[in-house]
Image: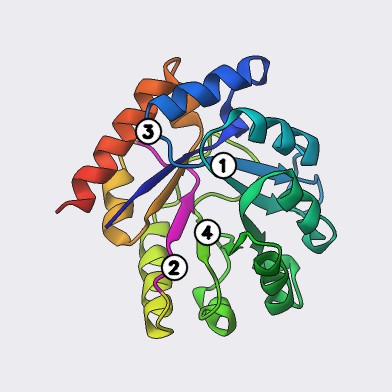
């Protein structure tokens, strides 16, 4: 099992963002996670296409873009053009989810579905065979630094079982409150992409924090 670490720039210092991205890459980051929020679907505003394009110029690993917005279809092409390798859209806002996932894939990016803590896993049933990844939110989206919701571990297990039933080996990504204390448990539950913001960028030494999170995840993956 290969586990990937995806530091979330939501918790980074934007005044030195290029330096911080370089630091987590030295620490073994496999992806850079970018949270795009519109102030409607979630109660916060963050970044848009220009920031993604700028980060693509300095990052050497793929960009994992999480669209926490009400009308993702309007912006898919722009984000892929800006450098997104992976795009996650929220099931909760899309009445035509198949079409959106297909559109992402046709643009050449990996298509993922994100689900909020209160969204039942069964809502993924109809798209489980076509997704490239599933993003399980382990906090209510909108802000960094929140406390991990314990039930998320069993939710990851349920998503893994659903994907397996559909014959889909797509990875499960977990985002929210991920740190050294729960990384091994999350990998044990079936997560293979760990998104971490505060526990990496909030430490004062993001390179070391990324390396330690990777070590904790890899230790469990080898068991």
Q: Which of marks 1 and 4 is nearer the N terminus?
A: 1
C-alpha span from label 3 to label 1: 14 Å
Q: Mark 3 or 1, which is nearer the eye?
A: 3
In this figure, which residue is indicated by the disc labeled 4?
135
Q: Nearer the viewer, residue 93 or 51?
A: 51
Q: Please, what secondary structure does the residue beneath circle 1 have?
A: strand
In this figure, which residue is indicated by the disc labeled 1?
33
* Mark 3 in CB contact with mark 2 (< 8 angstroms): no
**Residue count near mark 4 (Cα–Cα under 10 Å), binned few <14, some 14–19, many ≥20:** many
Q: Mark 1 or 4, which is nearer the eye?
A: 1
C-alpha span from label 1 to label 2: 18 Å
Residue at x 40% of width, y 22% of height: 207
* Mark 1 in CB contact with mark 4 (< 8 angstroms): no
Residue at x 79% of width, y 57% of height: 77
Q: Earlier in the sequence, mark 2 or mark 4?
A: 4
Relative to 103, 156 lies left or right: left
């Amino acid at each position: 099992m290969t586990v990937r670490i995806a530091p979330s720039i939501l918790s980074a210092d934007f005044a030195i963002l290029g330096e911080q991205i370089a630091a987590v890459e030295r620490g073994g980051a496999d992806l850079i996670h970018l949270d795009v929020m519109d102030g409607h679907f979630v109660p916060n505003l963050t970044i848009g296409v220009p920031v993604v394009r700028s980060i693509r110029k300095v990052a050497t690993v793929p960009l994992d873009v999480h669209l926490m917005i009400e009308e993702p279809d309007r912006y898919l092409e722009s984000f892929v053009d800006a450098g997104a390798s992976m795009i996650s859209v929220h099931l909760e806002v899309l009445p035509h989810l198949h079409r959106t996932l297909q559109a992402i894939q046709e643009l050449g990016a990996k298509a993922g579905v994100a689900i909020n803590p209160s969204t039942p896993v069964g809502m993924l049933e109809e798209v489980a065979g076509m997704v490239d990844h599933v993003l399980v939110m382990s906090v209510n989206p909108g802000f960094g630094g929140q406390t991990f919701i314990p039930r998320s571990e069993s939710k990851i297990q349920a998503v893994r079982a659903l994907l397996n039933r559909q014959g889909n080996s797509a990875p499960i990504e977990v985002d929210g409150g991920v740190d050294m204390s729960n990384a091994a448990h999350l990998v044990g539950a079936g997560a293979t992409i760990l998104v971490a913001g505060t526990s990496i960028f909030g430490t004062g030494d993001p390179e070391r924090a990324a390396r330690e999170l990777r070590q904790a995840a890899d230790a469990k993956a080898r068991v």
